[in-house]
Amino acid sequence: MENAASPKTASLRKAYGDMLVELGRQNENVVVLEADLGKSTMSCFFKELFPSRYFEMGIAEQNMASVSAGLALAGKIPFYSTFAVFASGRAYDQIRCSIAIPKANVRICGSSCGLSDFGDGKTHQSIEDANIIRAIPNMTVLNPVDAVELQKMMALMISCQGPVYIRVNRNDLPVYTAPGGEYQIGKMYPVPGYDSADAEAVIFATGVMVSQSVEAVKELRKEGLDVQVINVSTLKPLLREEALKYAAGRKAIITAEEANKIGGLGSGIASLLMGEVNVPFEQIGIEDQFGTSAHSYGELLDHYGLSSDFIYRAVKKALKK
């Protein structure tokens, strides 16, 4: 139960921009659309090299979604990006009617997701974007743990069928994903160094909550407690066989998400395990409220009960039951 070495950190936004360029080189059908936030989402990298395949749509997210649907139906592979709160909220009807219903091959990037835009407050913080998109039929929803996994997801998006929504954190996050191999939609990934098959409890975590869970487990190990951390980077589809693989035989189950608890990862995991695994269950998430401004990301994670200390306490509570 030795702790793994501290991983390096990397920018998911830069990884997104770099991978757009790489995909543009590989496939001339890749086109990119932006809603006046290219310097933030990093789609501007694509614009510099492929200006004829880059469309600046202005602050008109509904139109951007509709145009993306048209481009997809014409055989292009559109990636469009904006802040996650706008991608999921302002363009909901267009995503539902023009993208999801016809199963158009549109790739939507919800950038600066969750509370990661810590300075701009509740209007710019998306604590419900993945929950909203998960509810739309035909949508695939991805939430990468780090920059390496994000690029693997994007490589897969070239060939997969149907619309995909991917969340991109605004901040640099620790890298846990090995560079080799391909990403598999629906697969849950044990975090290296925190993947004991004999663990007493399991934490199903997504996005930034994976690194917070790892920090919590470091403290739990000092007390002799072995806890497994699972990176759930596919939020839809959530597969029952994957959840059961890691939940079976555990004394406690904990979920951790940087999102509203209602309709999120915790609810999804609970629905998969209902009637299959009967052990204490604790859910870490946001308690049905909007975000707020802060001086740092960590300050917000702590304020909303998402930091490693809260995960540590949730594990202890569940095991004590």
Image (tube, helix red, strand yellow):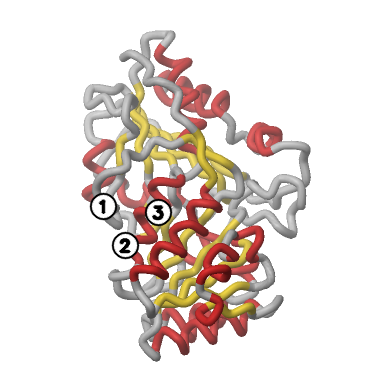
Q: Which residue is tagged 1? A: 182
Q: Is residue 41 above or below residue 250?
A: below
Please tell me in which quadrant of the rendered image residue 229 appears: top left
Q: Quadrant of the N terminus?
A: top left
- Where residue 55 appears, x then y in whole percent? 58, 80
Is residue 84 something that shows in the picture?
Answer: yes
The Cα atoms of the two marked residues, 1 and 2, are separated by 8 Å
Q: Could you tell me the amino acid type at mark 3?
A: Gln
- The disc, 1 or 3, on the residue closer to the chain's N-terminal end is 3
Which numbered marker is on residue 199? none
Asked whether the residues under the numbered discs 1 and 2 touch, taking CB atoms below 8 Å apart as contact, a structural biologist would say yes
Query: Which one is in front, 228 or 145?
Result: 145
Instruction: Identify which residue is drawn at 39% across, 89% down.
Output: 73
The Cα atoms of the two marked residues, 1 and 3, are separated by 10 Å
Instruction: Identify which residue is drawn at 48% across, 15% down.
Output: 219
Mark 2 secondary-structure assignment: helix
Q: Is residue 318 above or below residue 236?
A: above
Q: Could you tell me the amino acid type at mark 1?
A: Glu
Mark 1 secondary-structure assignment: loop
Please tell me in which quadrant of the rendered image residue 3 appears: top left
Which numbered marker is on residue 156? 2
Asked whether the residues under the numbered discs 3 and 2 touch, taking CB atoms below 8 Å apart as contact, a structural biologist would say no
Please rate how many residues cluster around mark 3, counting C-alpha atoms within 10 Å: few if below 14, some from 14 to 19, many from 20: many
